[in-house]
Image (cartoon, rainbow, N blue to C red):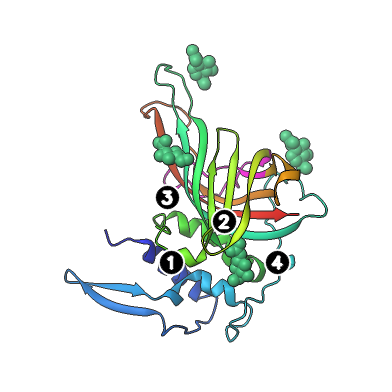
Amino acid sequence: MLFTQASFVLALATSAVAAAPIEKRWGGWGSWANHGGRPWWTPSASASYLEFGKRFPGADSNAPTCDLSQAVMPAAPTPLPAPASGLTLSHVAIGRGTQNYTCDLTNATAVPTATGAKATLFNVSCIAADTPDLLAKLPSIALDLPIPSSDDESSPAYQDMSGHHYFLDATTPFFNMDTTLHQYGTGRFKKSNGSNAPSDALLGTNNQGFGSVQWLKLDAKDSAGQVLQEVYRLNTAGGQPPKTCQGMPAAFEVQYSSEYWIWAQ
Ligand SMILES: *[C@@H]1O[C@H](CO)[C@@H](O)[C@H](O)[C@H]1NC(C)=O
Ligand SMILES: *[C@@H]1O[C@H](CO)[C@@H](O)[C@H](O)[C@H]1NC(C)=O
Ligand SMILES: *[C@@H]1O[C@H](CO)[C@@H](O)[C@H](O)[C@H]1NC(C)=O
Ligand SMILES: *[C@@H]1O[C@H](CO)[C@@H](O)[C@H](O)[C@H]1NC(C)=O
């Protein structure tokens, strides 16, 4: 399948073109090659949409000059509590992955039970600070693209990966913001508040599915023991299970994407 991580990055970059002038770096955007008789675009490292984000504002500047104190979280349909005073916004990421569910197959009226999620996080801090309208579109765009294989340390996606999100148990979402490139810390969280996604949120991949998961506020499980204190899951795209377990297997995954706003001490 040609749809690799590169096309994830390219499609996001393409959608960003309208919003920002392209700066050439490392020799431009990429090249066309012939793959099995079909033209295939290979983006270069500079084609990552995240590269745009790093260089806002001003496409003639290479410096990551964005000011995260200028970034404003989108308001949830049912307002979520504000961050605790004294915290600062440390990072904004796009998460792309799956929500996990189980079904009790012995129960004819069972409904899916959420058992956790698994997502790769990509740094979009500067997009959040400088072009919030663009940021708001990224979860929907990312949902329609495959989960990038950012495990390859030589890939552009790896350079922009800021961490991983997964669950330690059914009620403990975990954020691991340490990679071989940087150490931004880890944190164990618990759900503190939630809002249904807006009524016009995506149903799922290709707008087929059962809706977008709630917008959430997560608080640290042990605030004294970790730097990362609060996490907001906002502008969700996809992730909801069917209303009943009819026809579902004992365990299944639903594709989703989201913004994660991470606040620290
Ligand atoms: C996110 O990207 C910005 C701009 O390049 C950088 O300054 C910041 O350290 C990055 N943060 C993380 C957590 O990767
Ligand atoms: C969620 O936050 C709102 C706004 O701060 C508050 O009114 C509501 O009581 C909270 N709900 C829960 C379950 O804590
Ligand atoms: C079957 O599922 C329904 C819906 O979740 C639940 O209310 C009921 O208690 C379950 N029955 C059993 C025997 O677990
Ligand atoms: C659920 O999530 C875990 C990672 O947390 C993953 O390893 C597993 O394959 C997922 N899917 C299912 C159907 O359990």
The residue pinned by badge 2 equals 178
Tell me the CA gap for discs 2 and 1.
22 Å
Which amino acid does the dot numbered 2 rest on?
A: Asp
Q: Who comes first in sequence, dot 2 or dot 4?
A: 4
Q: Which mark is residue 68?
A: 4
Identify the image quadrant of residue 71: bottom right
Frontmost of labels 3 and 2 is: 2
Frontmost of labels 2 and 1 is: 2
Which amino acid does the dot numbered 3 rest on?
A: Thr
Q: Which mark is residue 224?
A: none
Quarter of the figure that contains the C terminus: bottom right
The residue pinned by badge 3 equals 205
Q: Which residues are magenta?
A: 192-217
Q: Who comes first in sequence, dot 3 or dot 2?
A: 2
Give yes or no for residue 70 being in the magenta stretch. no
Q: Which mark is residue 9?
A: 1
Using a 10 Å C-alpha cutoff, classify the residue at mark 3 as few (fewer than 14 neighbours), some (14 to 19) or many (20 or more): many
Q: Is mark 2 within 8 Å of ligand 1?
A: no
